[in-house]
Amino acid sequence: MPKIDHEQSFDGAEELIQRLGLDELLNEVRRILTSFSLLVEERRDANSAKVVRSLIDEQFKKAGGWTQRRSGGVDWIKRQAINSRPRYICVGVEIQVSGRSDMLSVDLIHLRKELLQGKIDLAVLVVPSDRLGNFLTDRVAKLSEAKRHIDMARADEMPFVLMAIEHDGPGPALPKQAKSPAGTTPIPRS
């Protein structure tokens, strides 16, 4: 099972988690990220980051109660009722394991926007560890790049949690998709 190799809270996120009782939802995110098998070929750029993303998305679907957005917002959101009243708390999760590293800035913008609009109470950004990132397709975002983007975007001024995941260990390469000419369907590689 993957492990969370690094976790860092920003701008009072720990206090917010305690005050609003978000620890149950945050623990669910941790369980989701560590509840499947993630074996990769331990060779630079040998594995499909898109496959890793699909595996993580599948775990959120299985967990139930999480709403997925395909584009234009936070990837996964879950609401939890407070004392069976019409009030709720909400966590938003951005998964950045399959896009170019510059997409981290877009994810941070999505998280900030949803926080400022009151749509989520706590934001979580998930990236591969530096070690795992080296084994995924090139240009993938990884922990060291996430920290750089956080500094550049001044995202450390919003309450969120950064998590980096590490794979279980060595295994066969996760199949990449062959690049196809523009306008055609990609052909899976064996």
Image (tube, grey):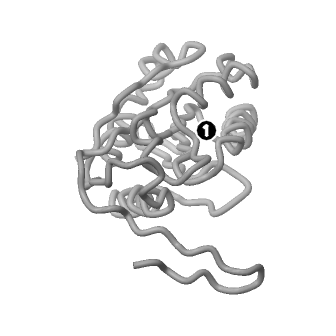
Q: Is residue 43 above or below residue 128?
A: below
* Foreground of the two, 166 or 155: 166
Residue at 73%, 19% (x, y): give it.
154
Q: Let me know if residue 118 appears in the view.
A: no
Task: Relative to 155, say whether 137 is above or below.
Answer: below
Residue visible at 55% across and 26% down in the picture = 144
Q: Nearer the viewer, residue 71 or 91?
A: 71
Q: Position of residue 73 (x, y in %)?
A: 69, 51
Quarter containing the C terminus: bottom left
Would you call the spot at circle 1 few (<14 residues within 10 Å), some (14-19), or many (20 or more)? many
Give the image location of residue 115, x and y in percent.
68, 33
Question: Where does the image place residue 71, in percent across and percent down from the top left?
Answer: 69, 60
Residue 113 is drawn in which quadrant?
top right
- State whether residue 182 is above or below residue 126: below
Q: In the figure, residue 153 lies in which quadrant? A: top right
Residue that appears at 47% across and 42% down: 133
Q: Residue furthest front?
A: 43
Q: Residue 11 versus residue 106: which sits nearer the camera?
A: 106
87 left or right, relative to 59: right
Residue at image mark 1: 120
Q: Position of residue 32 (x, y in %)?
A: 33, 48
The answer to whether residue 108 is seen in the rendering is yes
Q: Is residue 90 above or below residue 181?
A: above
103 on left or right of 42:
right
> Which three-letter amino acid code belongs to the residue tagged 1?
Ile
Q: Along the horizontal axis of the image, is 111 left or right of 84?
A: right
- Determine the residue located farthest toward the bottom in the rendered image: 184
